[in-house]
Image (spheres, rainbow, N blue to C red):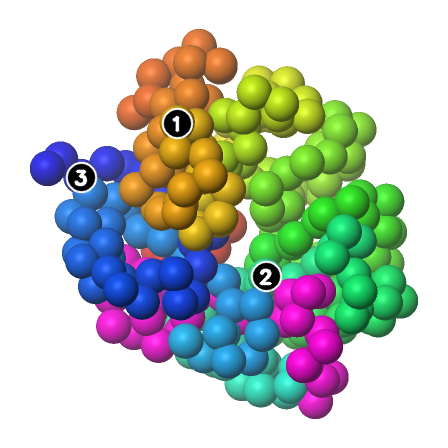
Amino acid sequence: MEKLPLFDTHAHLDVEEFDADREELLRKIGETMAGIIDPGCDLLSSKKAAALAHQYPFVWAAVGIHPEELGHSSFDQLKDIEALCADPRVVAIGEIGLDYYNDEHSPHPLQQEYLARQLELARKVGLPVIIHDRDSHEDVLKVIREAGQGVRGVLHCFSGDWAMAEEVLAMGWYLGFGGTSTFKNDRGVRSILARVPEDRILFETDSPYMAPVPYRGRRNNPLYTAIVAERAAMLRGTTPENIMKSSTKNAETLFFRLKHA
């Protein structure tokens, strides 16, 4: 099987949905893709992601506390997250951000405080960030403006409008596109993807969630990054190989330690 110049910048392969076939899936990924980034969502999953990155040379880790995981997290754990950042296999702080859809145990001010502190941590340790933004566009931008100066990052599974895209692109940030860009009701994602400069596009799956068409509703996996890239190439009038190469180069540029594997 031919190896593709393709990088999945967001795949949660440490979760239980992959317990039954993780090793076999990772073997296929290693044979067919340039690599993946596994972002943690709390302290435990961040440690699991780092462990996977040490086990497989094409896997990299991000570490952080997700807004949906604040109910069993604490600010003290950010010291442990910082310690994990010293690991050369850790290339980003993430998945962090705001989620105003699933916020029963995560009050908005608390989410904003965690995001601000982790942006400050990213600046301190010199790592980019992976931002989760669900129903919280205005506040995500507000916190990034106030606490994210000098930090680089990606807005994962981008769902904002073009004005938001323009603002973060002007900051030097990247936009992540995955399965939602293939949905019939894409909520404008494809119109954004069509306009974003090629040197700011990252591809992702958010595995095991958000599988692209024609696998929507099933378990997602990093091999489906190729589907996202192929659809994007059709949309933008280029070839799959060209956009795969450019998005992989973008991943290397943002997550700079990838170049030193």
Residue at 55% x, 33% y: name it: 180
- 3 or 2: tag closer to the N-terminus: 3
**Residue indicated by mark 2:** 95
Q: CB under 8 Å between callouts 3 and 2?
A: no
Which numbered disc, 3 or 2, marks the residue closer to the eye?
2
Quarter holding residue 13? bottom left
Residue closer to the observer: 66 or 211: 211
Q: Please report the bounds of the magenta region as a residue range.
A: 49-76
Q: Distance between the residues labelled 3 and 2?
A: 27 Å
**Residue indicated by mark 3:** 3
Element on which disc 1 rests: loop
Above or below for 40 versus 58: below
- 2 or 1: tag closer to the N-terminus: 2
Residue 214: which disc?
1
Q: Distance between the residues labelled 1 and 3?
A: 22 Å
Mark 2 Cα within 10 Å, few/some/many (few <14, many 20+)?
A: many
Horizontal placement of 242 versus 137: left or right? left
Residue at 33% x, 33% y: name it: 226
Residue at 31% x, 67% y: name it: 19
Percent across and percent down for residue 230 are 37, 23
